[in-house]
Amino acid sequence: MTQPWTVAAAVLLLVSAIPARAQAPVNPNASPEARALLQTLYSISGRYTLAGQHNYPNHIARWTDRAYDLAGKYPALFGQDFGFEGGADKDSTLARPALVEEAKRQWRNGAVVTLTWHAVPPTQDEPVSFRESVQSHLTDYEWRELLTPGSSLYNRWCAQVDVIAGYLRQLREARVPVLWRPYHEMNGGWFWWGGRKGKDGSAALYRQLFDRFVNLHKLDNLIWVWSPSPPGAGGNGPGQLADFYPGPEFVDVLGEDIYGELKTSFYEGLLALAGGKPITLGETGAVPSLEALKAQPKWLWFMTWSEHVEMANPVETLKAVYNAPNILTRGDPRLAEPLAAIRNASAEPAPEPVTPGATPEAKALLTRLYGARGRGVLSGQENDPRAVAHSSDRVFEVTGKLPAIWGQDLGVNEAAAARQAIVEEAKRQFQKQAVVALTWRAARPTDGEAGGKLTDFEWNELLTPGSRLNQRWCEQVDAVAGYLKQLQEAGVPVLWRPYPQPNGTRYWWAGRKGIRGSAALYRQLFERLVKHDGLRNLIWVWNAAAPGFRPDSPGLYSDYFPGLLYVDALGVDLEDGFFGYRRDGELAVFGVGKPIGVGLGSVVPAPAMLAGPQSRWSWFLAAASDWSSDAQSEALRKLYADPGVVSRAP
């Protein structure tokens, strides 16, 4: 395996002249790939301009492909946006998993990835419309609250940006450097984040995002791009750049979004502010003319906005620009060779748990889950809390094999003695080479009962730190943490499935959409168990119910998902045994490459639905059962006899 530090060295061998003015990234801990890419960009600046193409979220790579159709070459930059809308809209947030996978593919194919985000104001929840939300306005009071750590609006903002951080982390783990262009055109007044001058204005929000992404989430794969609009004349135009500049210590590349004439004043003004940093055309409609680029050679790239590649550009003009000697496209060896060096010198990605400082055993378990996909699905069996291993033993009686995973539920109202028995059995099963999976179907913190729902008032109290109901919940969680900690001390990692089926209707924690809904409770549990109780042995599984088409079917994954920063793996319960079509594809795409598992009911599917080279399942976990009927026993024997199903020796 190549060491990461060799990335920069390899690039230096291929790039003929890294200018002396090249600067280090503003993130002192930038990844080798980000450093090498920035060095490559410095080597290009003033000599060549990269052709770039933006795509709407739900269009994935449509306009990149269209640029190829029209110009005969692929653009060097692949641009995308994380979106804000819902459903099938072109700006749909539902496209995020697919567009991240496409960004990985584009990087492997030789493109540079640049991402932006038309963020929703923290006063609202996704999905929203463009004019009523992205182009809305915060009051001065709301703006001050947004910039005040600990305020409710600041906390809502954190929850929103952490969702995006999860996707960027997936790109970091795939060793993909990203030109990150947040809060663009902030010197204009048409977006909620824009139009505020001074140290506590729009630039402060950019710096706040920088701090959270760099210092908290360690998104070291980002190259930070600040891209305002060119300053306008009069009182109603975009403001002067210096009034909105976050500062050179927060910006790697400066850009301007220009949809009209490339005025000399725009170019020279940005160069003066950049102080030697590269400058770019963050967005354009028409591609810049070759005459303009000859007069203004330091534009490092241009990025045509989506359909403008066709609407605003005659085909012959586009071809002329894409084929000009000073324009670099994706296949040009002057760009392709240094980018290939970065990719080839990167260390192989290793899965990393979402828990900071995860135990070695937890890391090994996560690695095993990643390795199971398409190679051998791990068999699993849940057991009744009152008979801690009965169902697993019954599988052995029927098939002659033991499940690879031993599962239990820490229970709704189980007594301390019953939970302790589960812990002791978990230790014993782990010693026998079983993976330990624990579900927590928690009792209501209001009264300790299993069923029923919370009122809206009770739900808000539950999520309010310091409230009486929140304190009761903390006591409930800490009690369960005590049992989990015993397993941690014994070196037992746990496949941890708390609050299952949040998108269903069966449980008290389920069925609440949005940023303060079921996903918030999952995140709150993560924070409590990890930061307060110090648990590092958990592999966190977000386990949903399978969405359906009936009005009473479980809801869409996206409405209840806590975000990739809180999830190591994803699961789905198919309690009715319905396998009319493969159910792994939709969950695998939604999970952006994280391991996925399936919960089975009393009906065992054919092995082909779970195992084989095309399967994306890492494990299955069958519900507690006696497997007493002839049909069940025969289906179970066929499943465990399949070579793609992994069991363990007795």
Image (cartoon, rainbow, N blue to C red):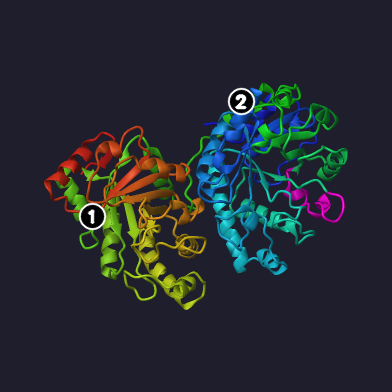
Q: Quadrant of the C terminus?
A: top left
Mark 2 belongs to which amino acid? Asp
Q: Which mark is residue 17?
A: none
Residue in the foreground of this view, choosing between 240 and 647: 240
Q: Which residue is mark 2?
A: 69
**Does residue 407 appear in the picture of this structure?**
yes
Q: Main secondary structure of the magenta part?
A: loop
Q: Which residue is mark 1?
A: 624
Mark 1 belongs to which amino acid? Ala
Near mark 2 (Cα within 10 A), the count class, few <14, some 14-19 or many ≥20, is few
Mark toward the start of the polypeptide (1 vs 2)? 2
Which image quadrant for residue 143?
bottom right
Q: Position of residue 283 (x, y in %)?
A: 71, 40
What secondary structure is marked by label 2?
helix
Q: Residue furthest left?
A: 630
Which image quadrant for residue 121?
bottom right
| Residue 11 appears left or right of 381 | right
